[in-house]
Amino acid sequence: MIQKIISCAFFYFFCSNIAMAEDSRGEFTDYLLELQQKAIATGVNQLTAERYIANIKIFKKASLNTHSDESQTLEDFIPQVVPEITVSTARAMFQQHESQIQNLSRAYQVQPRFLMALWGMNSRFGERTGRFSGLSVLASLAYKGDKEAFYINEFIAALKLIEQKSITEDLLRSSSSGAMGQMQMMPSQILQYGIDADKDGIINVWDSMDDAFASTANMLHRQGWQYDSTWGRQVKTTLMLDPNLLGLQTHHTFSHWQAYGVRRFDGTDLPQRNDMEVSLIAPDGPKGRFYLTYNNFRLLHQFNNSLYDTLAITYLSEKIKQ
């Protein structure tokens, strides 16, 4: 009798899971039809939308690119993600491609060390350019509901890359967060700022280092990158700070931060200039490191959702400079 009850319970559980899976697939199919209509409404050709949306499958590993280990501090994180082998590789790669990167730097007014640091941290110097179907990842992320509007826009931009820039569906590979290519740009960024630097007729940020670097440098330049400035600096605080002052959303001049008790890391006064609006961040809270971050940091931060990851990029850029 007990065995029969267990068998019936297992059968019910098994059937319920099948039904749930079928419902999930059905709901995703309906969602894809909504995406199709939204894409068409923004100017994507109906035949294009129908053709490529028909091939999309739900991608369960799709995830936001965030730093999730809350027990880890910057003291542990930075050495872990930027070990000496990464620093030495970055320096060697810079020497190998110095002429090419210097030319891009002059053309787009972005310091070479930042381009190299982005390359190293975002794709391990071109080794991790994305291996999943970009359309499936982006549609799945939109379907999940976190930042839905953002991912709908990126999904439509990916369709436009196929339609307007002759990028094939097979080439349109992404990470599990939807970022693409050697610099891990989002589709809307490639669509707006992509450069066919090697003049082969296609913006290939996956396989062409020329295209990847030029597209990134062009994006940063057009967004307001300041060539005569850096990303920021580590600082210390001498007074108790209102937590509401912390974060990239708050901008003050150096003199304001000086009045709040912020000093250079060596204890000396901050720069005496009022032509910059800078932000104070403390990723590990008031007992951790403090950084004053500039406009260039905000532009670098668009490549990641995590301050940890962006600070790793800036750390590597400093090591490349040394």
Image: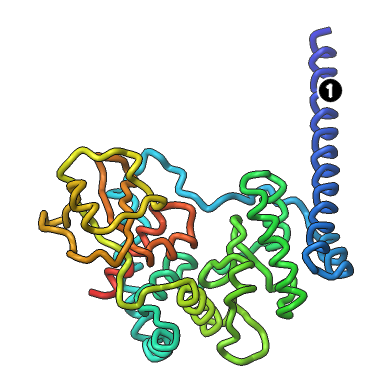
Give the left or right position of residue 177, taking residue 236 as reference.
Answer: right
Q: Is residue 40 left or right of residue 167?
A: right
Where 258 falls versus 17 (above or below)? below
Instruction: Name above or below for residue 202 compared with residue 322.
Output: below
Question: Which residue lies most toward the top here?
Answer: 1
In the rendered image, residue 58, in percent from the top left (x then y), is placed at 75, 51
Q: How many marks?
A: 1
Residue nearest the observer in this picture, 229 or 19: 229
Instruction: Assess disc 1: are there few (<14), some (14-19) or many (≥20) residues with their C-alpha within 10 Å of its C-alpha.
Output: few
| Quadrant assignment, res 114 | bottom left
Q: Secondary structure at mark 1?
A: helix
Residue 289 in view in this figure:
yes
The picture quadrant where one finds residue 72 is: top left
In the shown orientation, is residue 22 left or right of residue 86?
Answer: right
Residue drawn at x 85%, y 53% as measured from the top left: 33
Q: Position of residue 198 (x, y in %)?
A: 57, 90
Q: Nearer the viewer, residue 273 or 160?
A: 273
Residue 79 visible within the image: no
Q: Quadrant of residue 286?
A: top left
Quadrant assignment for the N terminus: top right
Residue 267 in the image: x percent, y percent?
11, 54
User: Which residue corresponds to the image point at 34% horizontal and 61% vertical from the top-left?
Assistant: 82
Q: Where does residue 266 sit, x and y in percent of width and height?
A: 12, 57
Q: Which residue is mark 1?
A: 12
Q: Locate the C terminus and report the quarter of the image it occupies.
A: bottom left
Q: Residue at x 21, y 46 (%)?
A: 260
Colour mapping used in the image: rainbow
Amino acid type for the residue under numbered disc 1: Tyr
**What residue is drawn where x is 34% and y is 64%?**
314
